[in-house]
Image (cartoon, rainbow, N blue to C red):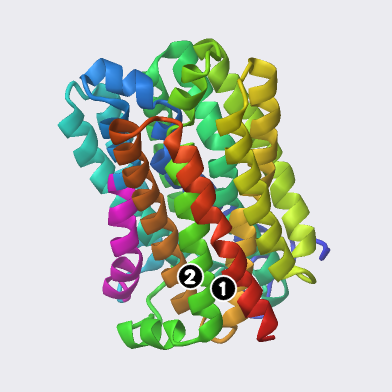
Amino acid sequence: MTTLDTPGTTTSDGRSPLRGWLAVLAVTLGIFALMTSELLPVGLLTPVGSALGVSDGTAGLMVTVPGLVAAVSAPLVTVTTGRFDRRLVLAVLIGLVGAANLVSGLATSFTVVLIARFLIGISVGGFWSIAGGIALRLVPARHVPRATAVIFGGVETASVLGVPAGTFLGDLSGWRTAFAAVGVLGLVSLACLVFLLPELPARRTTGFTDLARAFGRAGVRTGIAMTFLVITGHFLAYTFVRPLLAGDGVDGRMIGALLLVFGVAGICGNFIAGALVATRLRHTVMGISVVLALAMLILAAVEDTTVTAGAILILWGLGYGAVPVTLQAWILEAAPAATEAASSLYVSTFNLSIALGALAGGLAVDGITTTSVLWIGAALVVLALPVAGRAASRT
């Protein structure tokens, strides 16, 4: 691993490596706040639904709405804001997230919450797409791969740690406190971006034709297909993990702690996958599908106690923690000369899959049974196996 430059050195274009890394950390904090905000309702569906008078299935719209909006805003914001300073764009988007979460914490109707979630979706899609390629302008060239990994680590950390921590806080102090805390985190991120990010004047930006060319690559299409299947299957079930565990008799006061266990396992899964993707990328994708499917099927078939639920969530967390870094690596390998366009398509698909998974899960919960989401989610995840297998056979 490359050693960080000393504070007194500068790059050939005058950038201070230390200031560049501080800017990278500010962007990472912003992504962490965004993705924690998008996924926070996963652990708070039942409390929010009960307080605002809606069912668990309807409460799942808090995940569906921002996911759908982010899927559209990812390419649109990237293209339409191309003439603006990237620092300004990122600051506006993260400020919007902070304000929307504070509004959610004060809301007295579910409609107001959904409007706030709509605004969060705009920010998530636009911020993530722009931030994905911003390391090139912040640190020396030799540090770009590591800085990019740090920035995308904000996505993974939010998924596997931010949401469980928010759920735990919500269980302790109420769901409104959890939303308010993420709102404050967004405002802190705004301050960090304003003070630590340098001016980033507009350069050539991705156009809609670039998106089409990236999608024309077979490897990108395969990565998009696997992202859709794995993320949709995961969130179809995981969005409703709280009512699933409560329905099995797990003490509601323990669910936040169990999701923290899921988060810790997810961080381990992220590091394991990070060590494997360079040499065993396709095998890692296939292994993720098997682990996720097993976790869902075992949770559906076994009578759960706090101990057994914890063991299953460890397995599930290991699998999901490996997902973002692995699928992002697939996309970048498939389009090394068009990383911004390919990443935009990946971000769009990732968020669309979150939305569709939560929506389909809500319909299944309200129309069939809560447990049905585990069987359907496992089936979708398993479908990624032949997709990855065919891709491997062509290489």
Residue 344 appears at what percent x and percent y?
Answer: 43, 70
Residue at 31 percent of width and 22 percent of height: 48
Residue 189 in view: no
Q: Are dots 1 and 2 in contact, CB under 8 Å?
A: yes
Relative vertical location of residue 150 with respect to residue 333 in this rendering, above or below:
above
Residue at 43 percent of width and 44 percent of height: 236
Element type where label 2 sits in the image: helix
- For badge 2, the amino acid type reads Ile
Residue 110 appears at what percent x and percent y?
Answer: 20, 28
Left or right for 326, reference 283: left
Element type where label 1 sits in the image: helix
Left or right for 312, reference 379: right
Which of the 4 image quadrants contains residue 60?
top left
Relative vertical location of residue 376 with respect to residue 259 in this rendering, above or below:
below
Residue at 33 percent of width and 56 percent of height: 70
- For badge 1, the amino acid type reads Ile
Badge 2, how many Cα within 10 Å: few under 14, some, many 20+? many
Foreground pick, 40 / 285: 285
